[in-house]
Image (cartoon, rainbow, N blue to C red):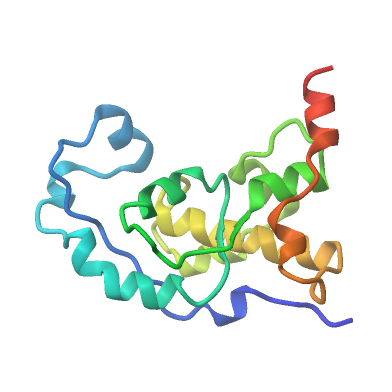
Amino acid sequence: MGRWSFTEGIHDPFVSFLQCDQDITWAARKVHGITTKDLAEAPSLLSLWPTLKSTLGRGPVVAHGHGTEKRFLRAFPGHPFGPWIDTLQLSRAAWPDLPSHSLGDLCQSLGLDSFAKYAPDRNWHDALYDALASLALLDHLVNYFQLAEAPVEFLLKPDTSTWHRLRHS
């Protein structure tokens, strides 16, 4: 079986700040590096809708801990986004005994860093960087467990019962 690659199709990732009517909190500035000034002339979410719809409406959406992204995209009632593949849940099912399932720790321990070339001068908690890292992790999981021929539904609700049992014992 040949190697499957989700990252082969990455050629021009879409990135944009979004207009916001609130000041960015100190914590958000520290974690994400975004300032109120960065958002001053950013487009509105509504003006980006056609781009988002054409980009994300084509198939599964991948994220590590997809809750934040899902909450954000709920601003568009009836949006076509999904199904959602959560690499956090997949990694907990795949390697339940790891001490950390954070995206950064997983990528480091698995030697996944080739995605970084698509996001030069960016780092963890940057939306593009984390999205590319999630895609690289999914790519690794699919190849490691030989899931390239499995239906996408197999990736949607992984069995994390062992991880939960280990965590609560």
Which quarter of the image is occupied by the C terminus?
top right
Figure check: 40 above or below 167? below
> Residue lying farthest front?
78
Q: Position of residue 45 (x, y in %)?
A: 23, 60
Q: Is residue 108 visible?
A: no
Q: Position of residue 112 (x, y in %)?
A: 67, 58
Left or right of 151, for residue 136: left
Q: Nearer the viewer, residue 115 or 64?
A: 64
Numbered circles on residues, count:
0
Q: Say which residue appears at 35% left-offset and 42% top-offset.
A: 32
Figure check: 55 above or below 162? below
> Residue lying farthest top?
169
Which quarter of the image is occupied by the N terminus?
bottom right
Q: Say which residue appears at 81% left-offset and 71% top-offset.
A: 150
Q: Position of residue 56 (x, y in %)?
A: 45, 70
> Residue lying farthest right?
1
Q: Position of residue 140 (x, y in %)?
A: 74, 62
Q: Is residue 79 visible?
A: yes
Q: Say which residue appears at 32% left-offset and 58% top-offset.
A: 76
Left or right of 14, for residue 102: right
Figure check: 89 above or below 161? below
Residue 61 in which image quadrant: bottom right
Q: Say which residue appears at 56% left-offset and 44% top-offset.
A: 65
